[in-house]
Amino acid sequence: MLDSELSILAIYGLFVAFTIFLQVSGATNQLGVGYILSARDEQRTVSGIVARLDRAQTNSITALALVAPPILILGIKDNFSTASLEAAQVFLIARLIYLPAYGFGVTGLRTLAWLGGFVATITLYFLAL
């Protein structure tokens, strides 16, 4: 399953969707179904793990937007390599660590996981050039 960059991209897309589901579920518990179904003209905020999941969700969407182009470019150019597969694997593993680390407030681990994913993303861009 982790044997192709495109599969890794798809897995990460599903993981981001799961992150959104977790955040929405938590927000529904804190804010109530009525508010979630409303136009949300009145600003309310979530707290605790749900707030951290909200920030992690935003960061995860940004990470997806950044990692997709080099993987797709490599695919279009038919230029996948051992290095690109390893960078994609590092990205995915780092991002899988990032979400629970952020959600549970493990700041040092969260930062290291973010950095690992970011470096892997930049590596993919260099490989795509």
Image (cartoon, rainbow, N blue to C red):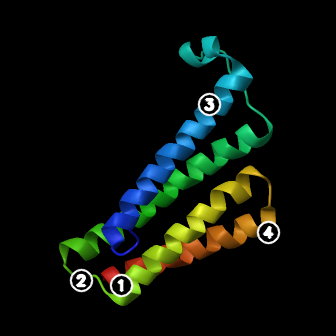
Above or below, 78 against 19 in this view is below
User: Looking at the image, how many numbered discs can be counted on the residues?
Assistant: 4
Q: Are discs 4 and 3 less than 8 Å apart at CB? A: no
Q: Quick one: label 1 or label 4, which is nearer the N terminus?
A: 4
CA distance separating discs 2 and 4: 35 Å
Task: Give coordinates of residue 127: x percent, y percent.
Answer: 35, 84
Q: Earlier in the sequence, mark 1 or mark 2?
A: 2
Q: Locate the C terminus by quadrant.
A: bottom left
Q: Nearer the viewer, residue 66 or 100?
A: 100
Give me the C-alpha separation between circle 2 and circle 3.
40 Å
Q: Is residue 66 left or right of residue 24?
A: left
Alpha carbons under labels 4 and 3: distance apart: 26 Å
Label 4 Cα neighbours within 10 Å, binned few <14 / some 14-19 / many ≥20? few
Between 81 and 42, the one lying in front of the other is 81
- The single residue placed furthest to the bottom in the displayed view is 82
For mark 4, what is the residue?
Answer: 108
Amino acid, disc 1:
Leu
Tell me the amino acid under the disc marked 3.
Ser
Q: Are marks 3 and 1 in contact (CB under 8 Å)?
A: no
Sooner in the amino-acid sequence: mark 3 or mark 1: 3
Residue under pointer 2: 79
Q: Which mark is drawn over residue 127?
A: 1
